[in-house]
Image (cartoon, helix red, strand yellow):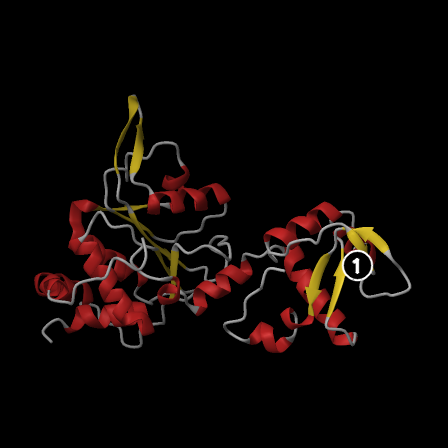
């Protein structure tokens, strides 16, 4: 091929998702109104090519593209990016959940209310795509387990530095765009964001989702795993208050209500209807309440380490 630098950069950034990367760029070029996932390039190391990729996108799309800071997202005024198709954010860290929600909104909104100083707000069509770069691999923002809008890629270090790479990329742009137009047509029928959940899932995204779990979730996961390792039972029942009294009786920062929220919102468990039950299978004690059911299969090392394991709603 006569675009070796361009294809090499795509391969370096997208790794084993190389084909997805090329399709993403084809859609970005040919279908500017199409919704696409938020791309997040992560690496703790410097010199990985993340910024080079942003600069390349900026070269290709010119005035349709804007580079902003994470603070620009959370500010009230959005005129800096409201009229742009591609929004690039380098060194992105979204510590506030409101900023995360704003990014997700940007990636799927079809209109935007333009807010700028000394001008009344007005709405315009909006087709923003977001590409983020960050040095924080696991905690640049909280991403819920059900979230499907993020395409997170861990970018490796460049083994051989090419100081002329941006000049070479610039020279290849016309031929690279021709290459994209000659690729097979994209199937838009499989997902509103073009790509399926399976296509954009990655180990890097899985790690961020795990890190996004609350401290209590991680603590309960360890407690339940230890409980099953020491008890010859396949399941047990307990209410949030049972769990509070048994494991957190002296910790005033963890309430039964907080435990209930984590069980329902993060573990995705559904409590039974009111019934008589024996907490933790202690047959000497019977309570009346609405317990949750916990199954050993969800807390064993085998299942937790198995890549495709997921919680099943009880």
Q: Is any part of residue 141 visible from this angle?
A: yes
Q: Could you tell me residue 107's position as x and y percent?
A: 34, 47
> Which residue does the image show at 30% across and 21% down from the upper left?
120
Residue 84 left/right relative to 90: left
Disc 1 secondary structure class? helix
Residue 314 left/right relative to 133: right
Q: Could you tell me residue 295's position as x and y percent?
A: 68, 68
- Which quadrant holds residue 63? top left
Q: Could you tell me how many numbered marks the image carries?
A: 1
Q: Could you tell me residue 22's position as x and y percent?
A: 23, 66
Q: Could you tell me residue 89's position as x and y percent?
A: 34, 50
Residue 164, relative to residue 72: is it above or below? Answer: below
In the image, 63 versus 204, the foreground residue is 204
> Which residue does the image show at 40% across and 47% down from the upper left?
104
Query: Which residue is disc 1 drawn over?
Result: 247
Residue 45 left/right relative to 221: left
In the image, 156 versus 21, the foreground residue is 21
Residue 80 left/right relative to 71: left
| Mark 1 nearby-residue class (10 Å; few <14, some 14–19, many ≥20) | few
Residue 27, relative to residue 182: is it above or below? Answer: above
In the image, 202 versus 260, the foreground residue is 260
Looking at the figure, which quarter contains the C terminus? Answer: bottom right
Looking at the figure, which quarter contains the N terminus? Answer: bottom left
> Which residue does the image show at 13% across and 71% down from the upper left?
3
- Which quadrant holds residue 26? bottom left
Name the residue at the right extreme.
284
Q: Is any part of residue 255 visible from this angle?
A: no
Residue 126, relative to residue 139: is it above or below? Answer: above
């Amino acid at each position: 091929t006569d675009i070796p630098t361009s294809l090499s950069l795509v391969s370096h950034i997208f790794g084993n998702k190389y084909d997805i990367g090329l399709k993403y760029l084809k859609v970005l070029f040919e279908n500017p109104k199409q919704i696409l996932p938020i791309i997040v390039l992560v690496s703790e190391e410097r010199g990985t090519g993340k910024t080079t990729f942003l600069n390349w996108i900026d070269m290709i799309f010119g005035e349709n593209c804007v580079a902003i800071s994470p603070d620009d997202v959370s500010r009230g005024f959005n005129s800096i990016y409201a009229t742009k198709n591609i929004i690039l954010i380098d060194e992105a860290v979204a510590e506030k959940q409101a900023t995360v929600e704003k990014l997700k909104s940007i990636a799927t909104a079809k209109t935007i209310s333009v807010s700028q100083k000394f001008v009344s707000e007005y709405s315009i069509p909006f087709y923003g795509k977001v590409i983020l770069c960050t040095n924080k691999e696991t905690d640049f923002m909280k991403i819920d387990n059900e979230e499907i809008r993020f395409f997170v890629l861990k970018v490796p270090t460049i083994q051989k530095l090419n100081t002329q790479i941006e000049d070479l990329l610039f020279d290849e742009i016309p031929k690279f765009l021709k290459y994209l137009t000659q690729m097979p047509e994209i199937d838009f029928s499989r997902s509103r964001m073009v790509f399926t959940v399976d296509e954009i899932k990655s180990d890097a995204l899985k790690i961020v989702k795990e890190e996004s779990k609350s401290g209590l979730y991680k603590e309960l996961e360890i407690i339940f795993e230890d409980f099953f390792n020491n008890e010859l039972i396949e399941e047990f029942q307990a209410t949030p208050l049972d769990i509070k009294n048994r494991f957190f009786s002296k910790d005033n920062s963890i309430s039964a209500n907080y435990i209930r929220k984590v069980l329902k919102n993060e573990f995705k468990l559904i409590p039974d209807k009111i019934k008589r039950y024996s907490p933790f299978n202690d047959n000497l004690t019977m309570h009346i309440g609405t317990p949750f059911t916990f199954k050993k299969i969800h807390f064993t090392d085998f299942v937790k380490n198995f890549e495709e394991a997921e919680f099943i709603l009880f």
